[in-house]
Image (cartoon, rainbow, N blue to C red):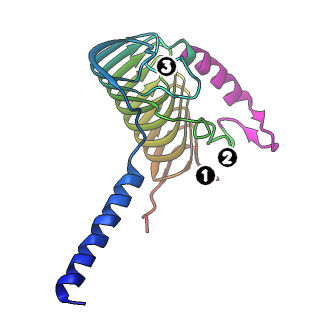
Amino acid sequence: MTQSMYRNSFFTLIIIFLFCTVSKGQKKFPSHIDSSFFCWTPTTKNKVVQGVAIGLTAHPWSSWDDTIFVKVNGVNLEVEPFGIIGGVWGTMYGLIGINDENGNRLSFFSNHGYDSLSEIYTEYGTHINGLSISIGGIDNSYNHGIIFNGLSGFSHEIKGFQFSGLINTTVDLKGVSVAGLANVATKANGIQIGLINKCKTGNVLQLGLFNRIGKRVIPFINFRIKKTK
């Protein structure tokens, strides 16, 4: 085999590797997506809003399986009644505690109950990029930006800043999570500020009366900084 053939084979392998890597990393999108500057929510169509979304909730109600793709690049203003219900219900069970099917105690203070949101099936998801103000609280979304919730925030991902009057529950936190009562994250890389803070793992600074990182509980100030290998 000549040097030219070796070189061509090498570049062919590189192209195949890059193609497979990109294809594997791409997220699934619906075949048709409407785009507009303004949108009343909730929508029943796959939608990208390059401006302002106003209504009851950016998270669509048409299916509990998140089979509608919604992305707001700009400002989201909503009522979100489920955030009110979730905030009250989540606060009650978080403080009192309940047992799961395996007998583990789920509460704001236990070392269990992190993965409830990650178990929710999401085909496309609701994505908020920018500023969101919700009276009840944003629900089942991927948030990149600045998020203000009246009572609760139940998010698959936070990249930026999120404030909620009662509770924040997040699968993946990369930024700052502030709550009047409790912050809960499966993985936290950033800061949690509230009366109660807990996360399963990550590099995080916690400021509050009760702070849990994994099995470790320290009042007032708790932090974990671990270099990734």
Answer with the quarter of the image where residue 31 lies. Answer: top left
Amino acid under label 3?
A: Pro
Q: Comparing marks 1 and 3, which lies closer to the viewer?
A: 3
Q: Comparing marks 3 and 2, which lies closer to the viewer?
A: 3
The disc, 3 or 2, on the residue closer to the chain's N-terminal end is 3
Please tell me whether mark 1 sits on a helix, a strand or a loop: loop
Residue at image point 40% right, 23% down: 46
Segment colored magenta: 83-108
Q: Position of residue 68 (x, y in %)?
A: 47, 25
**Residue 106 vertical placement versus 65 (above, below):** below
The disc, 1 or 3, on the residue closer to the chain's N-terminal end is 3
Disc number placed over residue 72 in the picture, else none:
none
Residue 191 painted magenta: no
* Placement of the N terminus among the 4 image quadrants: bottom left
Amino acid under label 2?
A: Asn
Along the viewing direction, whichever of 34 and 169 lies nearer the viewer = 34
Q: Is residue 67 left or right of residue 148?
A: right
Residue at the disc numbered 2: 111
- Mark 2 vs 1: CB contact within 8 A: yes
Q: Position of residue 207 (x, y in %)?
A: 48, 40
Residue at image point 54% right, 12% down: 81
Other-residue count near label 1 (Cα within 10 Å), few / some / many at <14 / 14–19 / ≥20: some
Separation of marks 2 and 1 at Cα, in angstroms: 6 Å
Other-residue count near label 3 (Cα within 10 Å), few / some / many at <14 / 14–19 / ≥20: many
The disc, 2 or 1, on the residue closer to the chain's N-terminal end is 2
Residue at the disc numbered 3: 60
Residue at image point 63% right, 18% down: 88
Residue at the disc numbered 1: 214
Other-residue count near label 2 (Cα within 10 Å), few / some / many at <14 / 14–19 / ≥20: some
Along the viewing direction, whichever of 17 and 150 lies nearer the viewer = 17
**Residue 3 vertical placement versus 51 (above, below):** below
